[in-house]
Image (cartoon, helix red, strand yellow):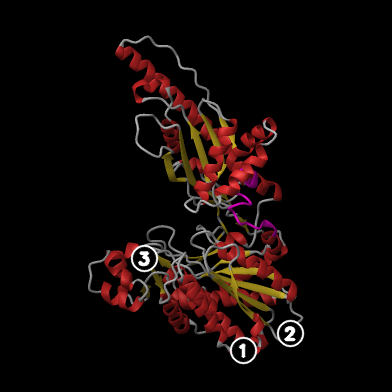
């Protein structure tokens, strides 16, 4: 094995000391620093055009991606491996009294040795094989792996049987604007430098799958994520005539009851199962207190996918929404009947009908009915972009509200749509030449190193977290993606997503990455030996096997 540990360890601490919280000036500063680190490498002094600081596209702040290309001595070799990693982190408010030490791993470690901390954290740190701090795991150590590898390949480029492209991106923790901006430059380099991308290796963090899990994981491909959203229309009434209206919160609660943590909504492929949906927002749309019941409500749910397309998810959720609607109406009717019996009032059934539309269906209904509908809706959506208080989710919801004003009536209904980014699933296929080649390279690398480490190295199909991996390849067909586009109100407006660039790149992608625990939590920590010695050597072996195959 090549001795990477000390170098990766020092680079990790150096990078962590740059607070690069997403959405802050720190993202810009760490990009500058990484660029300056690479600029000192003799290879890039001889080939300065191969090192690039690339600004993000259509962004409201100054931040950058860093790209660095190393070409093997045999310039006729087109095969190129992309090394990926993100340079931003989440915030540090959760560190409480240790917030000032969150970006100083050594000081934080010393402080924690004097404090009462969770026993599991204490046990790990006592071994001397763990390093704490914000970003040590997610994912400054992963970027450090890639920097160490770039330094190595820059020194030994004459022995390199292909090319390496280093890509360090910003904004992974929020809107993925970094990787989405980098795609154009990556594809441009392919044409300009005659590169054939055969694989991408991401270095995002990995963690135990359950308490006591002894394994370390390499992932072939990645989970996808959708954000199905529901605009729920009720009937307003004064609380003194409660049964003359219909509370949208009653319907929304039935919907959440059927989706939240429901294993029936898990997507299984190759024996691997996604986590079930979970609610991320549920609210009515009243802006102030009064004694009128809410007229509408809004909710969205995290939804992971392995095999289901956006269209399949809509079809499944339409059925769930219809069932929730029927149950809510039945509950409403039975409670009204019970109230009438209790109060001595005559009971007369209230006529309510469950109605569930997709955004596409309701949009087309309005388009056919009103000649000037599309023009005026576009004008509304463009003007709405000026409201900086709206995030992507609320921007999409406001468009749906406006849509309902055009085609709605006074009866309850649900409009089902997507309100956030399309984060594609990526399935690595052995039936495709590059996919098969990468899978074999991973298997050989694991075999090479299985005796160098005392914990099992396992290969799984789907990286279980959201990452930039989703934007370098895509497994959904054009028709399946169009289903998302037609049901995403902000598509092409507040949703900067260039599907053409993704399809143009479309490179098989895996994740190796550092290993640790409690990412996005104050106890974030990385295991030193695996992350800084085994993981870089695994990556190196995968690259070597790829170029030799």
Residue at which label 3 appears: 92
Closer to the camera: disc 2 or disc 1?
A: 1
Q: Which residue lies at the image location 38% right of the left edge and 16% below the top edge?
A: 337
Q: Residue furthest right?
A: 76
Q: Residues within 10 Å of mark 1 (few under 14, many from 20)?
A: few
Q: Is residue 313 above or below residue 176?
A: above
| Residue that label 1 marks | 45
Which quadrant of the figure has residue 285?
top left
Return the disc, 1 or 3, that comes first in the chain's sequence: 1
Q: Does 72 sit left or right of 286 as displayed?
A: right
Stretch of the chain drawn in magenta: 484-500
Quick check: 447 above or below 413? below
Residue 229, how many percent across, how many down? 52, 42
Number of the label disc, if any, that sits on residue 204: none
Quadrant where the C terminus sits is bottom right
Decide if residue 330 is on the left or right side of residue 227.
left
Q: Nearer the viewer, residue 544 or 205?
A: 205
- Pair 2/3: label in front: 3
SS of the residue under disc 3: loop
User: Which quadrant holds residue 117?
Assistant: bottom left
Query: Which residue position is annotated with label 2?
Result: 74
Q: Determine the residue positioned at 54% across, 52% down.
A: 386
Q: CA distance from mark 2 to mark 3?
A: 46 Å
Q: Nearer the viewer, residue 85 or 494?
A: 494
Q: Residues within 10 Å of mark 2 (few under 14, many from 20)?
A: some
Whether residue 499 is in magenta: the answer is yes
Q: Position of residue 548 (x, y in %)?
A: 69, 77
- The x, y position of residue 326, in whole percent, is 49, 26
Q: Quadrant of residue 374?
A: top right
């Amino acid at each position: 094995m090549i001795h990477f540990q000390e170098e990766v360890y020092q680079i990790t601490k150096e990078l962590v000391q740059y607070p690069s919280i997403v959405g802050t000036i720190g993202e810009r500063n760490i990009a500058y620093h990484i660029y300056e680190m690479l600029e000192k490498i003799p290879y890039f002094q001889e080939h300065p055009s191969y090192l690039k600081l690339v600004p993000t596209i259509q962004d409201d702040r100054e931040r950058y991606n860093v790209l660095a290309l190393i070409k093997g001595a045999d310039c006729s070799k087109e095969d190129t491996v992309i090394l990926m990693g993100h340079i931003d982190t989440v915030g540090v408010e959760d560190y409480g009294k240790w917030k000032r030490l969150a970006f100083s791993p050594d000081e934080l470690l010393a402080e924690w040795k004097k404090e009462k901390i969770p026993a599991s954290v204490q046990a790990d740190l006592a071994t001397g094989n763990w390093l704490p701090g914000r970003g040590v795991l997610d994912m400054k150590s992963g970027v450090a792996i890639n920097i160490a590898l770039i330094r190595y390949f820059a020194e030994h480029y004459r022995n390199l049987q292909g090319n390496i492209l280093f890509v360090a991106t910003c904004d992974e923790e929020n809107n993925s604007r970094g990787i989405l901006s980098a795609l154009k430059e990556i594809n441009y380099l392919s044409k300009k430098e005659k590169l054939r991308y055969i694989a991408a290796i991401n270095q995002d963090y990995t963690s135990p799958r359950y308490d006591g899990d002894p394994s370390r994981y390499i992932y072939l491909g990645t989970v996808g994520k959708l954000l199905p959203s529901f605009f729920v229309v009720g009937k307003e009434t004064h609380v003194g005539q409660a049964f003359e209206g219909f509370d949208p919160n009653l319907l929304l609660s039935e919907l959440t009851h059927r989706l939240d943590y429901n294993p029936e909504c898990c997507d299984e492929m190759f024996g691997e199962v996604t986590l079930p949906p979970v609610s991320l927002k549920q609210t009515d749309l009243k802006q102030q207190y009064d004694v009128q019941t809410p007229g509408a409500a809004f909710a969205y749910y995290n939804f992971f996918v392995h095999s289901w397309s956006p269209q399949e998810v809509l079809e499944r959720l339409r059925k769930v929404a219809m069932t929730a609607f029927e149950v809510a109406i039945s509950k409403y009717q039975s409670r009204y009947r019970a109230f009438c019996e209790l109060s001595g009032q005559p009971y007369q059934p209230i006529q309510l009908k469950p109605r569930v539309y997709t955004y596409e269906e309701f949009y087309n209904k309005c388009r056919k009915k009103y000649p000037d509908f599309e023009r005026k809706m576009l004008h509304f959506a463009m003007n709405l972009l000026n409201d900086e208080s709206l995030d992507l989710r609320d921007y999409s919801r406001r468009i749906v509200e406006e849509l309902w004003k055009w085609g709605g009536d006074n009866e309850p209904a649900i409009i089902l749509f997507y309100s956030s980014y399309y984060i594609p699933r990526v399935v690595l296929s052995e039936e495709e030449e590059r996919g098969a080649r990468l899978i074999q390279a991973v298997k050989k690398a694991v075999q090479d190193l299985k005796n160098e480490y005392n914990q099992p190295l396992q290969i799984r199909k789907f990286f279980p977290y959201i990452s930039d991996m989703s934007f370098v390849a895509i497994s959904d067909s054009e028709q399946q993606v169009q289903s998302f586009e037609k049901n995403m109100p902000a598509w092409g407006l507040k949703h900067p997503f260039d599907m053409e660039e993704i399809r143009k790149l479309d490179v098989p992608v895996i994740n190796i990455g550092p290993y640790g625990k409690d990412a996005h939590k104050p106890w974030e920590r990385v295991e030193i030996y695996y992350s800084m010695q085994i993981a870089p050597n695994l990556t190196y072996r995968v690259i070597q096997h790829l170029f030799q195959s």
